[in-house]
Image (cartoon, grey):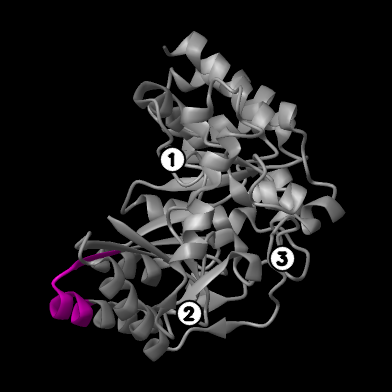
Amino acid sequence: MASLMIQTVKGCNLRCRYCYYEDRDMEIMPHETFKRILTNFIKRVREKDRKIRVIFHEGEPLLAGIEYYKKIIEIEKELSRKFNVEISNSMQTNAVLINKEWIKFFRKYKISVGVSIDGVKEAHDKVRIFPSGDGTFERALHGLRLLKKIQRVSVITVLNRHLVDKIEDVFFFAVQENVNIQISPVSPTENARKSKLTIEPHEYGEALCRIVDLVKLYNIRVNPIHRFVENLRLGRGTDCMTRGYSGAVGVDVEGNVYACHRMLENKRFLVGSYLENWFDDLKYEEFKSRPYVLRMGECFNCRFVNVCNGGCMANAYNAYGSPFRRDCFCEAYRMIYEELLKRFL
């Protein structure tokens, strides 16, 4: 399946203290722009893949409103018929705007929705805040629980300075709410450093190692633990991070294409424009070569290189200013893989 990660809304209704974007003014992608972007994307991938996944991510997509996305669905149906492709949709949201009307919309159009929530109210409300400074946990939890009535939900939790010692609480939040969870370390962005929210690699590794045995007892998916187990069994990386480069490019509100969805507006990662219908294949191939560069350098002697491939290039860039360095959480990943070999394999 070919994935298109697209920013229909530039801007957000929250001011998360570790966010890697500074957007304050909202901009919504015009429908005609979306149509041209999707048309050019389909033309690029349809010879290899007739299934398209459109992921509305970056910014807060719900700010565009239900009527906006109804028109988006109409455009997708038109292009699906024209090019004989199958199109599905998903969204990533902070959930504070989810209400019964949104739930009806998600159900009717079978849209998969992920929620960003930090699991522990006290910690969440310190970093995921409204512009007023008020915490958003209760609003986000309300939206999450509405969503759970119609679909299985996955959440993203950012493990930061306020949460790293509360990893068990984060885990049992997911158990109590019966949701799958991705526990990601806060990337060392300028905002995260200024807010003193960054954590050390060994702290992230030790935190996840503490819940490995718990993970085996409950019927929820906890990433990266489950994904790392799959990688070890398959002998290769299976997702954006553990392939060593972003397999799903990110497209900003103006149609510009970036090699990583977390690097929108960063010209170093600009590889094309689906609005203007150009794509620099050579530059994108450069990013795809990252795992091979690292195999010959920093990762040469690592026993886990086949299942890690240098980790997340966004984390590498945020820490060292280069996507061709290994992920700054490399030490953590080695710790986790070692623990999983003992416990699962």
Percent coordinates x, y for residue 135 in the rendering: 71, 58
Judge the density around disc 3: few (<14), some (14-19), many (≥20) Cα neighbours within 10 Å. Answer: some
- Locate residue 318 relative to residue 10 in the image: left or right: right
Judge the density around disc 1: few (<14), some (14-19), many (≥20) Cα neighbours within 10 Å. Answer: many
Please name the amino acid that badge 1 sits on. Val
Task: Name the residue carrying label 2.
Answer: 255
Q: Alpha-carbon distance for marks 1 and 2?
A: 33 Å
The image quarter containing residue 296 is: top right
In reply to whether residue 258 is colored magenta, the answer given is no
Task: Report if residue 22 is visible in the image.
Answer: yes
Task: Name the residue carrying label 1.
Answer: 179
- Indicate which disc, 1 or 2, sits on the residue closer to the N terminus: 1
The residue under the point 61% across, 63% down is 263
Q: Nearer the viewer, residue 41 or 5?
A: 41
> Nearer the viewer's eye, disc 1 or disc 2?
2
Q: Alpha-carbon distance for marks 1 and 3?
A: 25 Å
Point out the stretch of residues depicted in magenta.
Answer: 77-88
Position of the N terminus by quadrant: bottom left
Percent coordinates x, y for residue 16 in the rendering: 70, 60
* Number of callouts: 3
The residue tagged with tag 3: helix, strand or loop?
A: loop
- Indicate which disc, 2 or 3, sits on the residue closer to the N terminus: 3
Task: Name the residue carrying label 3.
Answer: 15
Please name the amino acid that badge 2 sits on. Gly
- Indicate which disc, 1 or 3, sits on the residue closer to the N terminus: 3
In reply to whether residue 85 is colored magenta, the answer given is yes
